[in-house]
Image (tube, helix red, strand yellow):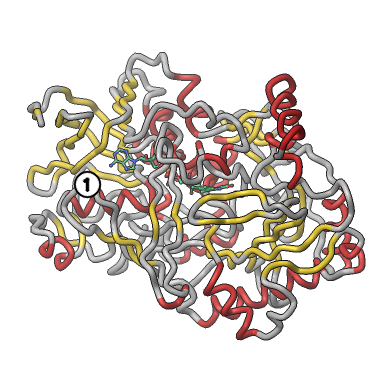
């Protein structure tokens, strides 16, 4: 292995070109006086990543994905739950399910209430507006000039109207903009798909500005660790093929490696829990007990029904001659099944009337999905898959390094279902899905419940089904939490506590999950981080 001494200095270095990292790189390099380096461990692209249906194809593909697995835990029947994470420019936004959700107003107000002033809904709204160019009916709450094009699903399958009607039968409203005034209800999904192609963070934030002379992007470069002078971050060490290169920084490093890798990089660099670092013989630069703690994710059982009405389920669209037609449709018209997001209809529901905000989210997918050892396949039978997850789970897990080798995956413990509220809410969520799907309206389309099946008819049996089968909807967050308590890692301006010249901007800083899919919130965090830096907020 060849090692180079520090050979180049940048004003700002961003680690990880994912949802947040791309936004930071774009905004910092808007000022031509800022010399910016963006470092990505993965490749620059994958030939399939612009295709929306690639979420199913890249979900376990080593060329674009870190392919993590959780530790086996008794709460989830000792299974190793797959944790896909994007490993290419755009990060997870280049392989995700393209569902666009900001989260609930109350999520951000709670962050502010926890002491993170400047993160209330009113504070983050300008950044959500700044980043998007919403192509649907606009309002004063939506942005129209941002780099990220957001569109509403154009597919119109009769079952979608059936779902809307069935929901209304049980007093759930149809919502035309769940990212607008009110989140509650069911509606067509807003997506990061434009003209039939994926709008990843790379497409939105990097492609238009790649010619900027003050922005250097390097790929296939794994950041091994950060370098310090006392408690000041002064550079980092990168592995590129068989070379080790050191870069130095004159102003700040921004860690945007995502919820799994940002805490991993901190620990490899000597920032974290003393016992974790000493066990791996890593010299302690700064003790921070919250690094790698507070891991949250959306565990989501999938309830599947047989579709009996012909021409409704899409299971046969991806087989034989029909698949050939869909491929042609995509190539010539950028249209059809292959341009759908992972779920064309989503809902935000309350399992108890008295709640201030919806406590569960559901995704409705007009085909039977089979999850097998991290892979996602279309089932043989025609079906509809309904995922349900609790918006704000209380159960917390952790991520810690297994060794001092940066190429060794960290140990990921979810500790799912350890809170009784989480267990209760998920069981209620499954029952709510059954009420919608069991309505007279849906009987026109659907037959029997294939998974878990009608014999799972008690709370105990539903819970056992969740333990045995549920995977996540891929939203790990919280492992470098923002705040000022014992478990927090960054302050409200995203600066790492006790360290100079180092911020974190990605899913890891979220103190709690948001009520929805996490891509939009991550981009907003990137926008906010750049704004803090450019406005020199201490
Ligand atoms: C399969 C899947 C489906 C999803 N579906 C949706 C959805 O439909 N809607 C939605 O809103 N959200 C969805 N999500 C979640 C969402 O995409 C993520 O929450 C979000 O993209 C995370 O952004 P981030 O900036 O925190 O990290 P990421 O986007 O994951 O970026 C981190 C980047 O850092 C790089 N990196 C990591 N370590 C290093 C290192 N040591 N050196 C250099 N580079 C490094 C990674 O390769 C990656 O490019 C999905 C995620 C997945 C995986």
Residue at (19%, 46%) from the top-left corner?
Answer: 500
- Left or right of 133 in this view: 75: left
Residue 358 point in image, percent of width and height: 66, 66
Tell whether circle 1 marks a residue whose Cβ is less than 8 angstroms from ligand 1.
yes
Residue 165 point in image, percent of width and height: 88, 59
Q: Is residue 249 above or below residue 59?
A: above
Residue 95, can we see it? Answer: yes
Residue 241 point in image, percent of width and height: 22, 29
- Left or right of 37 in this view: 54: right
Image quadrant assignment for residue 220: top left
Residue at (79%, 39%) from the top-left corner?
Answer: 155
Q: Which residue is mark 1?
A: 406
- Left or right of 48 in this view: 366: right
Residue in front for this viewpoint, 506 or 5: 5
Number of residues whose C-alpha sits closer than 10 Å to that of mark 1, classed few (under 14), some (14–19) or many (20 or more): some
Name the element at disc 1: loop
């Amino acid at each position: 292995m060849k090692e180079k001494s520090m050979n180049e200095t940048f004003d700002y270095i961003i680690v990880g070109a994912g949802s947040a990292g791309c936004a930071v790189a774009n905004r910092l390099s808007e000022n031509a006086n800022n010399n910016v380096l963006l470092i990505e461990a993965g490749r620059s692209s994958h030939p399939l990543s612009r295709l929306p249906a690639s979420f199913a194809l890249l979900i376990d593909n080593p060329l674009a994905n870190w392919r993590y697995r959780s530790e086996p835990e008794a709460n989830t029947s000792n299974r190793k739950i797959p944790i896909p994470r994007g490993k290419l420019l755009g990060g997870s936004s280049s392989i995700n399910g393209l569902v666009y959700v900001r989260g609930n107003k109350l999520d951000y107000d709670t962050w502010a209430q926890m002491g993170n002033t400047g993160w209330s809904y009113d504070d983050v709204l300008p950044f959500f507006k700044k980043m998007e160019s919403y192509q649907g009916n606009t309002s004063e709450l939506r942005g129209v000039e941002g780099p990220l094009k957001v569109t509403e699903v154009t597919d119109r399958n009769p079952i979608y109207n059936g779902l809307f009607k069935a929901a209304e039968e049980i007093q759930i409203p149809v919502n035309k903009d769940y990212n607008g005034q009110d989140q509650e209800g069911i509606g067509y999904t807003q997506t990061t798909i434009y003209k039939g192609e994926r709008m990843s963070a790379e497409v939105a934030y990097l492609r238009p500005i790649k010619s900027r002379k003050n922005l250097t992007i390097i790929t296939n470069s794994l950041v091994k660790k950060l370098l310090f002078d006392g408690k000041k971050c002064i550079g980092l060490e990168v592995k590129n093929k068989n070379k080790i290169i050191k870069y130095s920084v004159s102003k700040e490093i921004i860690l945007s490696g995502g919820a799994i890798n940002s805490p991993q990089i901190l620990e490899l660099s000597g920032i974290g829990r003393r016992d974790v670092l000493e066990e791996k013989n890593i010299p302690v630069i700064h003790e921070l007990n919250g690094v790698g703690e507070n891991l949250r994710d959306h565990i989501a059982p999938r309830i599947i029904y047989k579709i009996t009405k012909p021409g409704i389920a899409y299971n046969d669209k991806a087989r034989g001659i029909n698949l050939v037609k869909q491929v042609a449709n995509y190539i010539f018209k950028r249209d059809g099944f292959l341009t759908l997001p992972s779920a064309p209809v989503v809902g935000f529901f309350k399992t108890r009337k008295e709640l201030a905000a919806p406590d569960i989210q559901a995704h409705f997918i007009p085909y039977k999905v089979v999850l097998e050892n991290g892979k996602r396949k279309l089932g043989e039978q025609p079906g509809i898959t309904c995922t349900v997850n609790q918006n704000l789970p209380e159960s917390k897990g952790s991520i810690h390094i297994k060794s001092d080798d940066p190429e060794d995956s960290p140990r990921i413990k979810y500790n799912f279902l350890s809170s009784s509220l989480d267990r209760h809410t998920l069981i209620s969520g499954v029952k709510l899905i059954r009420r919608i799907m069991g309505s007279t309206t849906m009987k026109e389309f659907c037959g029997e419940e294939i998974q878990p099946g009608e014999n799972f008819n008690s709370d105990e049996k539903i819970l056992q089904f969740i333990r045995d089968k549920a995977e996540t909807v891929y939203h790990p967050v919280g492992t470098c939490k923002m705040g000022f308590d014992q478990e927090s890692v960054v302050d409200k301006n995203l600066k790492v506590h006790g360290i100079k010249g180092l911020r974190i901007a990605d899913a890891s800083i979220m103190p709690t999950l948001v009520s929805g899919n996490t891509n939009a919130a991550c981009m907003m965090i990137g926008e906010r981080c750049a704004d803090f830096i450019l406005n020199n907020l201490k």
